[in-house]
Image (cartoon, helix red, strand yellow):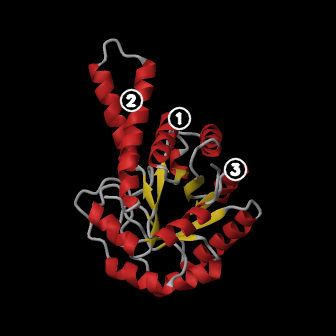
Amino acid sequence: MALVTFKQLLAVAQNENKAIGAFSVGNMEMIMGAVQAAEEMNTPIILQIAEKRLKNSPLELMAPMMVSAAKNSKVDIAVHLDHGLTIECVKNALDFGFTSVMLDASLLPYEDNVNATKDVVAMAQNYGASVEAELGVVGGNEGDTAEHIIACTDPVVAKDFCERTGIDALAVAIGNAHGNYPVLPSLRFDILEEIQAIVKTPLVLHGGTGITDPMFRSAISLGIRKINIATASFDSLAKYAKEYCNNAEPADYFKLSSAMIEGTAKNIKRHIEIFNNQV
């Protein structure tokens, strides 16, 4: 099909009352597994990588593979920079052909977040790319950053933020957190409902790993149109790789590679079914 922006994908998701899965990748096998899953499910997806992951998966190596995979896919795929922390990294991603970017300035004072986000929106327009931003504080951590205490998004502030910045998607904090949850989270669907009522911008849920299927469905029914999955895919790949290495004698690289692809694809297909409201 084509390399597309996530703005295009989120518009389709809005019309069909579903969410687009945004799946983080860290190597070639994860990219291949994600595309394989999307093609088997005949469902568009978003391939993404966070700036904090680039020390393990350099952008100059990952970006060409991600963009090429999207261009050659049988389904539409957007390629996204997740949790960009610097303008330099955002620009690099755009120069590599990413079709959407996120500058995470959510920990800055509100007006600084607004101004920084407006700058990124203006930059992205020159590339025809979409922009995501975050408001409130999603818990946990992204990469090796310090743990953050959750601060739920204020609906009235969210409306002001979206109108002033012109972003294409807003990541909200409703009790969600990055990484594996130590206990099942209590998501503030009441706050999400208030945000949906007054904010026209498509909404994003970060920290999807560990959230239950009914929680996903409730979030989608209340306007969530992009859901990020990272840890679950990394864990699934590692599990399949470990099982292969524990049982293979002698170990074979090519079979190990296939195991990593399978582990990634299986996790992503399960989430696509949920996000498409198929199960």
Q: Nearer the viewer, residue 24 or 6?
A: 6
The tag on residue 259 is: 2
Residue that protrudes farthest toward the left in the picture: 183
Secondary structure, mark 1, is: helix
User: What's the distance in space between the residues labelled 1 and 2, CA to CA?
Assistant: 13 Å
Residue 57 visible: yes
Q: Quadrant of residue 227?
A: bottom left
Q: Quadrant of residue 55?
A: top right
Residue under the point 74% across and 59% down:
127
User: What's the distance in space between the residues labelled 2 and 3, CA to CA?
Assistant: 29 Å
- Crowd band around label 1 with a 10 angstrom C-alpha radius: few (<14), some (14–19), many (20+): some
Residue under the point 39% across and 35% down:
262
Mark before the other along the chain sequence, 1 or 2: 1
Mark before the other along the chain sequence, 2 or 3: 3
Residue under the point 31% across and 17% down:
248
Left or right position of 140 against 106: left
Which residue is tagged 1? 28
37 shown above or below 91: above
Please, what is the three-letter code of the amino acid marked with disc 1?
A: Met
